[in-house]
Amino acid sequence: MANAEISLTLDDTDSAPISEAQYQARIQAIGNRLNAANNLGEALINLKDEICELFGADRITVYVVDGVKRELVSRFKSGNEVAEIRIPVAQTSIAGYAALKQTLVNIKDAYDQKELTAIDPELQFDSSWDRRTGYRTKEILAYPIVYQKYLMGTLELINRKGDGEFGSVEARALQELSKIMGVALYNQKRIAARGGRTNKYDYLLENHLLTQKELVKAIADAGQRKEPVSAVLMKDFKIPKKEIGSALEKYFKTNFIEYNGNYPIPGDLMAGLKVPFMRNNIWVPLKSEDNKVVIAVDNPHDLKKIDEIKALFPGRPVTFYVSLKQDILDFIKLFTQDEKELAEIDDILSQLQVESDEVEEAETGVGEEDSAVVQLVNKIILDAYSRNASDIHIEPYPGKMNTQVRIRVDGSCTIYQTIPFSYKNAVVSRIKIMSDLDIAERRLPQDGKIKFKKYGGKDIELRVATIPTQGGLEDVVMRILAAGEPIPLDKMGFSKRNHKNFVSVVTKPYGLIFVCGPTGSGKTTTLHSALSFINKTETKIWTAEDPVEITQRGLRQVQVKPKIGFDFAAAMRAFLRADPDVIMVGEMRDKETTSIGIEASLTGHLVFSTLHTNSAPESITRLLDMGMDPFNFADAILCILAQRLVRTLCKTCKRKYHPSREEYDELVREYGEEDFKSTLNIEYNDDLQLYKPEGCDLCGNTGYRGRMGIHELLMGTDDMKKLIQTKAEMAKIRGQAIHDGMRTLKQDGIDKIFQGHCDLLEVRKVCIK
């Protein structure tokens, strides 16, 4: 450093030069105070004005390395608008680039992309912080904080006060301050490591998620409010639950488990346990692993409590996980939640234990309304209904393996509960009794329905199927039928084009409309929404369904019964003699039904139906292969709507982020580059934002909650009708449909990704093209 005088602007009004000796003295004084401080964060708070004044900077940010996630975390910053900034150690940000390359970065204008690109093609400035706070970042001077070979963080100065830019003098000064700060940070970590963990939350201090002063305040506040310290840390200091979990894992040296509303109920472990005892002592059994019992407890170091719990599981090894008090209470509530007069699950399973001698055969001991088996089946149905499940799977296993109960929520199966192996026959038989099935017949599949109102109070209807499985057992699958009012057509998630075109055809006086997709893709719901749209006094609407799931006033709905010969074709023939305007038939699965549907549409009726096909163009080739007359079919067809249900991001916890160029290019490639430019035409820039799943209590920490439709609407245009008449290949039909304006299922899904409803992973799960 030259021995000339160094001119450092002290603030907007004071620009008196100081000598190098004075400058060195001030840097050394700052270093001494940092090294002497017990808490670096508190020292920085006291020194922030002095540091900014010395460098003539408006703001200072100190990033430290999060040793767990390999991210830079803003340990200290002089602006108060944003609580915390997290950035990766990568060349995608200025502080991240300085840390990764361990070099000085001096930016004259953070918004000048050419200046950033000249340093590194991937270097960017995230302007979202400025937009959120109203602050305008311009000059940035950044340098890594390193001790020997260890990266400790990054020191960043923002906006030079007055005129001018950060020069070589400030750069050398910053390098010297960074060295001092590196020593201070290293010493702090070394002292913490040498002293051992004496506090549950030392991990939060070491990783700069919390200051000692904040922790002392949190402990004091928790004592006054009679709340756990963890609750105060999450509520008042915004410490994420996962970080508190990591702190507890390090301290107790065991796994941390947080509450999940979809956690499978360990029915076999809950049997015989007293709920008040678990609540008072804050513990709960979670699962069995290789004959080992896993217990969640708030304090695994409480030896008295540990010994009491072990005594309840004699002869079995017990493993203890740590969890938060409220999470354990929530688990207990989940595992034992009550419904009106129903007994709690532990009482039910205790009764099953008592009744084991009586329930030796499937046919005995299950007919009494007060039996534990009856209560257990009722509880399974009510719990699944309360969790918005669409299906319940009862899965018995041979030998002494427990029966597994799984439920499907938003299209994904999760384990709900385990039932002791000795009651597998009793549970299946009880469900068969409720469904009016033959309990003695175990060799053939059977199907029936349960009207649950007469058993459990709530007006729930279930479709039941039993299937013989190996080992002389039977699986039961119960589908909870979607009762209630149809969803309005404008709430179905249609794009503007699809909504406009679909409404234009459902209001036509005659023609044929198909909705296609696999089982559970929402076809019936869409048809009922369309019928609701045209359900007027002057319109006579007949429907043939199997089963009737959604009921609407004004519709004349018929349940088909194939066993007695009253199938869809017979129902349609009957409808044509009953003066209809509109006919809806549940499915056209054979030539006869389809032929009657086409004839009905050609004789002045509007006909709705469903098909099990993968896409709208495939439906045309499927129907022609069925033997339909291509000229009649071409005349009749109005549109074919293919649809899928895609899991949507949880509205409560989904998180905005700026996608990388590679991620954007992948979305464009999946959509089709030409189609993307002509339809969406969304450009990649700094303001582009997508959403990603985060996870919260409401979505069971999955990041997803609910589903929405993605659609592919093929219109029966004149050009399309010509192709149908000539029995054209599917590729030509598809090409014509796209020319007519059809978006494929994947394209509609990608459009909804850019709207912030879902992500590419979920769209790929439900469609190929």
Image (cartoon, rainbow, N blue to C red):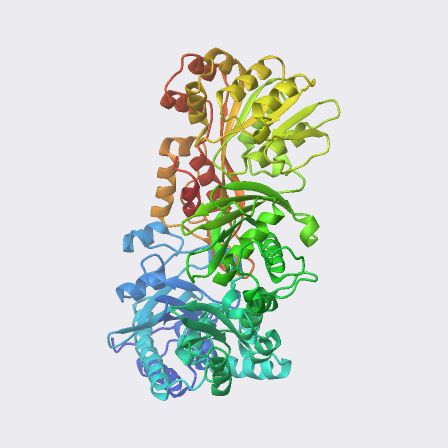
| Quadrant (top left, top right, bottom left, bottom right) of the C terminus | top left
- Residue 445 lies, in percent from the top left, at 49, 41
Q: Nearer the viewer, residue 560 or 495?
A: 560
Q: How many marks?
A: 0
Viewer-closest of 713 and 550: 550
Residue at 45%, 21% (x, y): give it: 623
Say which quadrant the N terminus sits in: bottom left
Where does residue 124 sit, x and y in percent of width and height? 36, 54
520, 11: nearer the viewer = 520
Where residue 662 sits in the image (x, y, percent)? 33, 47
Q: Does residue 489 appear in the picture of this structure?
A: yes
Above or below for 230 versus 522: below
Q: Nearer the viewer, residue 362 or 565?
A: 362
Q: Residue at x 65, y 22 (%)?
A: 582
Q: Position of residue 332 (x, y in %)?
A: 57, 69
Q: Residue at x 52, y 23 (%)?
A: 639
